[in-house]
Image (tube, rainbow, N blue to C red):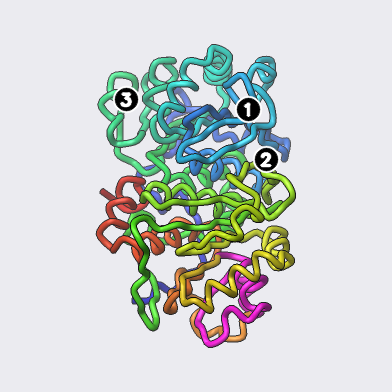
Amino acid sequence: MAFRHLAPQYSLQRLSHINRITSPKKRFLSVSATMASSARKVLVPIANGSEPMEAVITINVLRRAGADVTVASVEKQLLVDAGHGVKIVADTLVSDCADGVFDLITLPGGMPGATHLRDCAVLESLVKKQAADGRLYAAVCASPAVAFGPWGVLKGLKATCYPSFMEQLAPCATAVESRVQVDGRVVTSRGPGTTTEFSVALVEQLYGKEKANEVSGLLVMRSNHGEEYTIRELNPVEWTFDDCPKILVPIANGTEEMEAVMIIDILRRAKANVVVASVEDKLEILASRQVKLVADVLLDEAANLPFDLIVLPGGMDGAQAFTNSEKLVNLLKKQRQSNRPFGAICASPALVLEPHGLLKGKKATAFPALCYKLSDQSEVENRIVVDGNLITSRGPGTSMEFALAIVEKLFGRNNALELAKTMLFVRP
């Protein structure tokens, strides 16, 4: 069944669970109405065990909107071992932000990441001051219950969190089962699968609805949040592997970090053996929205290993680095020649696969603005296209569906849907 892409119009009105600010005695004016400056200052603290999708999606989306985002480690070092083996290098330590003033402080979830955030005295002081001063603060997944609850910054407010923490949240707030909940200047959300909606809601709070719509359109967001995802599959074949599928995910300077992290995180959740390889001359790369990620190995170390699947994230500069890497292109050509699966998302189908003849005789899709580069554009409006051993997709807002479609091809629809429900991408 094909899912045809609809031009996304993000609208808080469409999210019926989001509160409107109704009483001036109990609610503040929206941030967008009270702030004159266009560059909003945002603090995103991260810790060992933070959920990488929640952190990176939030950082990426807010930077797309023009926010000045500081990523601060609550650990003793900048390098953070986030969940699912994803390594993120922060911009600074949170201790260096103690005297800072921010328009928004927003916490990712993940365990034990949320606990580490809760136990950081500097961060607790910053958030309490944020609340006392009437400035915007937000949290997703475990953090509303684990951090905000004990800090007492949700009293008298409606809030949501990851389902298994709702009981813990209940004594600290009016707990509601919303995908995204806005109450005054507090925004909370449920999990990895709601984080893109959460992040765009933060954009609306900071910059207004027009900017939120602009950002969500460029992301190629879904129009049916919570519904089951669908894929367009042609010439179906079984993707086979021995024991545990081994998957190569290359990254480069300029790689789209949302796409890379969602692919890595979700495939590792599915228990695949994911190898993240830098095509640069060092492990650390600077992604498209200035998030610093650390690969597992250099591509040279991975080049002689067999992989059941090779998946390319997008990002314009990252895709250009991929297409210029003779070693990676040769790996992709060998993958195709041996009838093993490979795939790409966003800019990479158009800038890597197409010019190297890897889409010959295949149907594919790509980022909307680059689909004109595909020689066969007959299926480009689909969010996910699977043609035999090839899988392609459109952009950051389709990345979760893309990764879940890969899980489906490797482990079956039921396993993919269970994972989607666990992440709150699909309603439990």
Q: Which amino acid does label 3 sit on?
A: Leu
Question: Mark 1 = which residue?
Answer: 72
In the image, what residue occupies the spot 65% across and 27% down? Answer: 78
Distance in Å between CA atoms under marks 2 and 3 = 29 Å
In the image, what residue occupies the spot 50% across and 69% down? Answer: 342
Question: Mark 3 = which residue?
Answer: 169
Q: Give the image location of residue 147, x and y in percent.
A: 43, 21
Residue 229 in view of the camera: no
Q: What element carries label 1?
A: strand
Q: Quadrant of residue 225?
A: bottom left
| Quarter occupied by the N terminus | bottom left
Residue 283 in view of the camera: yes
Q: What element carries label 3?
A: helix
Q: Quadrant of residue 308?
A: bottom left
Question: Which range of residues does the magenta coloring cover?
Answer: 345-373
In the image, what residue occupies the spot 60% across and 50% down? Answer: 257
Label 3 crowd (10 A; few <14 / some 14-19 / many >=20) = many
Q: Is residue 179 above or below residue 127?
A: below
Q: Are marks 2 and 3 in contact (CB under 8 Å)?
A: no
Q: Earlier in the sequence, mark 1 or mark 3?
A: 1
Question: Mark 2 = which residue?
Answer: 67
**Drawn side of residue 1 relative to residue 281, left or right:** left
Distance in Å between CA atoms under marks 1 and 3 = 25 Å
Q: In this view, does 426 lie above or below 82?
A: below
* Front residue (pair 153, 422): 422
